[in-house]
Image: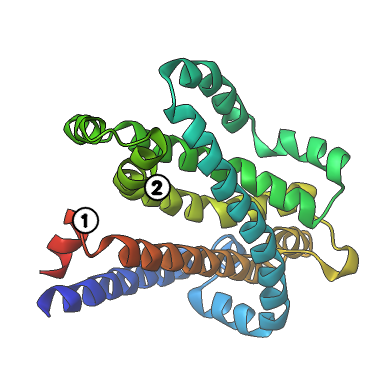
Amino acid sequence: MLRTFLKIFLPAVTGAVVVAIWFGVNAGLSSDRRFLLPSPTAVLNAFIEHRATLAHAAWNTSQGALLGFGLAIAVSALTSYLLSLSPLVRSSLYPFLMALQLTPLPILAPICVIWVGAGLKSVALLTFVIAFFPLVVNTTQGLISTDRNLVELFGLYRASRWNQFMHLRVPAALPYFFTGLRIAATLAPIGAVVADMNAGSSAGDGGGLGFQAVIFSSQAKYPALFATAAATCILGFIFNAVVLALAWFALHHWHDSYERTDK
């Protein structure tokens, strides 16, 4: 009970301190420089004023993020299986996976626009790129880190390679998978917003939060720009909350970290 209370109370106190410091910094700025850091009140008012626009933009961004995130999960699962088969396979493919991850999105964005056109498809493809690497690396590490004694036990009972994979390696890799999933869930909304800035389109009223941030910035609506950042954070929290719930559902019955938390 006390731990649950502290988990709620401590973040609330930290948030209150941050808001108080924010008010203090804003008050310390001269009147002609307060646009650099609008007050929390100004940001809240802008959020309320532009709530319909931000909600629509967040919906558009979430579509691209979900499509890219889902594609990253599917492709990383297959890729992780291939990488877990042999060290030679990992040595052959890892450099190219790293090259894909290390290529900046603003450079990939024009290529995606050429391939699939500006808009949702490009945003989803770029989100896939940024979410794919942490998923495949963590899942692969989990698949190859299975307890050697258990692997030998399965071999002793002449379990097929597929049975060993499904009934031993996959369960052992689940904590690693969900760690990668949490990282990817954090990166997916960010990737979708950045992709929207570089490869998004307002055609068909399809502009997302990144596109809306560019508009607010060009119009010098700085409180609205901060409100857009807040909307992006909310979207990220939603993604993370869903992943945490899935991880708890899959792991809390047997994984030590969840068992200790429940006690």
Q: Which mark is residue 255?
A: 1
Depth order, front residue of 4/158: 158
Picture quadrant where residue 6 is located: bottom left
Q: Quadrant of the N terminus?
A: bottom left
Q: Which mark is residue 165?
A: none
Depth order, front residue of 18/54: 54
| Residue 222 x, y percent position in the rendering | 65, 66
Picture quadrant where residue 211 is located: bottom right
Give the class, few, some or many, for how many residues have Cα within 10 Å of label 1's Cα (few <14, many ≥20): some
Give the class, few, some or many, for how many residues have Cα within 10 Å of label 2's Cα (few <14, many ≥20): many
Q: Which mark is residue 177?
A: 2
Depth order, front residue of 96/191: 96
Give the residue drawn at x 24%, y 64%.
Answer: 252
Element carrying mark 1:
loop
| Residue 19 x, y percent position in the rendering | 39, 72
Q: Is residue 56 left or right of residue 2?
A: right
Q: Is residue 28 left or right of residue 119?
A: left
Give the residue drawn at x 62%, y 60%.
Answer: 66
In this picture, is 141 found above or below 126? above
Give the residue drawn at x 37%, y 45%.
Answer: 170
Q: Point out the tag, 1 or 2, that comes first from the N-terminus.
A: 2
Q: Quadrant of the C terminus?
A: bottom left
| Residue 168 x, y percent position in the rendering | 30, 43
Element carrying mark 2:
helix
Tell me which colouring the rendered structure shows.
Answer: rainbow
Q: Amino acid at mark 2?
A: Phe
In this picture, is 50 found above or below 238? below
* One can see residue 30 in this view: no
| Residue 95 x, y percent position in the rendering | 54, 19
Picture quadrant where residue 169 is located: top left
Report the Cα–Cα distance between label 1 and label 2: 13 Å
Q: Amino acid at mark 1?
A: His
